[in-house]
Amino acid sequence: MESSMIKYSPSTGNFYPADINYSSYPADIIEVPLADAAAALSRAADERIEVQAGRLVMVKNTVPTDAARDRVEQIIKSERDRRVGAGVAVGNKWFHTDTFSRAQQLGLSALGKAIPANTQWKSMDGSCVLMTATLANQILAAAVQQDIAIFAAADRHIALMRTSPDPLKYDYSQGWPPSFRD
């Protein structure tokens, strides 16, 4: 009959299955239920194992881990990247700023006065405006300024989150330049 217990060492953080013949065990070896071992092996990244009354208990880390901070930093960077492609305002219109749109705008800017007459350009609200060399350059200049502001906001959020006592609860939703969907 298979045992429902497994050996565990709090000092090493290792499990010692009964079917392996070990020459020695750490001094603090204890037996714990297999269910506790399964829970410990599938614990969340922000949890640690503690032994309480002979049982393994998963406890939230009170000190943020580097992994938690790194995870939130990636989330902030994803938000930064989303906002870079979320449009830019020129006058009372919003224009697309995804990679494809930026390439088109660069092409229009390069054409300058050679932009075909009466070229209609769709704005983010679905309405069309007359595209001119001036407008193409205004869109590009606004996008550059917005990129600078977005990257600065992301850097600020990352720095603040890294000093937060609970990076997983850090609110990075405020302090960004406006986007079309805000």
Image (cartoon, helix red, strand yellow):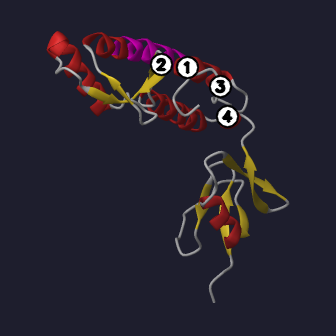
Marks 3 and 2, how far apart at CA: 14 Å
Amino acid type shown at disc 2: Phe
Q: Do callouts 4 and 2 mark residues in contact (Cβ within 8 Å)?
A: no
- The answer to which image quadrant residue 43 occupies is bottom right
The span shown in magenta is 140-153
User: Where is residue 93 drawn, in percent x and y?
Assistant: 46, 23
Residue in the foreground of this view, choosing between 99 and 64? 99
Amino acid type shown at disc 1: Pro
Total numbered circles: 4
On screen, residue 57 versus residue 136, left or right, reads: right
Marks 3 and 4, how far apart at CA: 22 Å
| Label whose residue precedes the other's in the sequence (3 or 4) | 4
Q: Which of labels 1 and 4 is toward the front?
A: 1
| Label whose residue precedes the other's in the sequence (1 or 4) | 4
The residue sitting at 54% across, 31% down in the picture is 76
The residue sitting at 51% across, 15% down in the picture is 152
Residue indicated by mark 4:
64
Q: Do callouts 3 and 4 mark residues in contact (Cβ within 8 Å)?
A: no
Q: Do callouts 3 and 1 mark residues in contact (Cβ within 8 Å)?
A: no
